[in-house]
Image: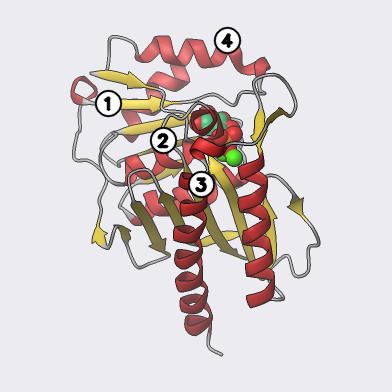
Amino acid sequence: MTMQKELLLRFQFAKGLAYELGDTIRKNVEDLKWTKTKSGFYDIVTNVDLEVEKKLKEKVSTAFQNDVIFGEETGIEERKKPDNYMWIVDPIDGTTNFSKKIPHSCVSIAITYKEKPIIGVVYDPFMNELFEAVKGEGAFLNGKHIHVSDVADLESAVVNTGYQYSAVNMRDKVLKDYEAFFGKVRALRIFGSAVLDLCYVASGRIDGFWEYELKPWDMAAGSLIVQEAGGVVVDLLSDEFTVYSKSILATSPKMLSKMVKILKEA
Ligand code: IPD
Ligand code: CA
Ligand code: CA
């Protein structure tokens, strides 16, 4: 099978799966069985996170037996061919929102090849919005092309951020960054789903997003969607952004230097 065919097969499969898993998330909002803490009282997991990841692993491993699956809740079971196809999955991004019945969370599926994202599929079941991108093919929201915003000045910008709940050591930096933007941009937001934050940059709803200490499942799909929407994704702490980066800034080419300046000076 050619790589193009292999890619298309996985893309269609990922989209079908995202819709199905998104339905599971939405249907379970009223029926949450349990919420447990992980590394601290702020870091939680629910029975639905586990159920969604289990379903995905079963389906992907049956359909694509040699692919590696890397999920937030269960990690990598076995790294068969690190350089081949790897599915990086966040079963629910925005678990805290979900556990409080705040309708802002999603399922995120990325497929990497040689550890670089080539497919990104994100489904928000509460808005019925599917964000998707294949490397080199553009980014789409419910089948329509999306593009990062045209805003070029800080005064007209709405930017957002988040903080990794378990990274308490980052407290000062998070607050300093927030303060640095305060009064310089039109508005600052914290929505609670880094994956959707990236998709909102891609679709021009938000003019820039940054966060530290995110994990590969928070960034792999969304970063590709931003790039394919004409945006830029950089690592604020290193020269090259990868899905393993410890920081991310996603914005438009017009806003990049302005946002970097504020964050570096904060
Ligand atoms: C979290 C969300 C949140 C971000 C945290 C993430 P989770 O993911 O994306 O917006 O600020 O850093 O851990 O725990 O809901 O999958
Ligand atoms: Ca997440
Ligand atoms: Ca999650």
N-term-proximal mark, 4 vs 2: 2
Ligand 2, what quadrant? top right
Residue assigned mark 4:
172
Callout 2–callout 3 Cβ contact below 8 Å: no
Residue furthest toward the front? 31
Secondary structure beneath disc 3? Answer: helix
Q: Amino acid under label 2?
A: His
Mark 4 and mark 1: Cα distance apart in space? 22 Å
Q: Is residue 36 left or right of residue 6?
A: right
First-in-chain label (4 vs 1): 1
Give the alpha-carbon distance from disc 3 to disc 1, as whole Å.
29 Å
Callout 1: SS: strand
Q: Earlier along the polypeptide chain: callout 3 or callout 4?
A: 3
- Label 4 amino acid? Asp
The residue where tag 2 is placed is 104
Q: CA distance from mark 3 to mark 4?
A: 34 Å
- Residue 247 seen in the figure: no
Q: Secondary structure at mark 2?
A: loop
Residue closest to the eye, 27 or 171: 27
The disc labelled 3 sits on which kind of residue?
Answer: Ile
**Mark in front: 4 vs 1:** 1
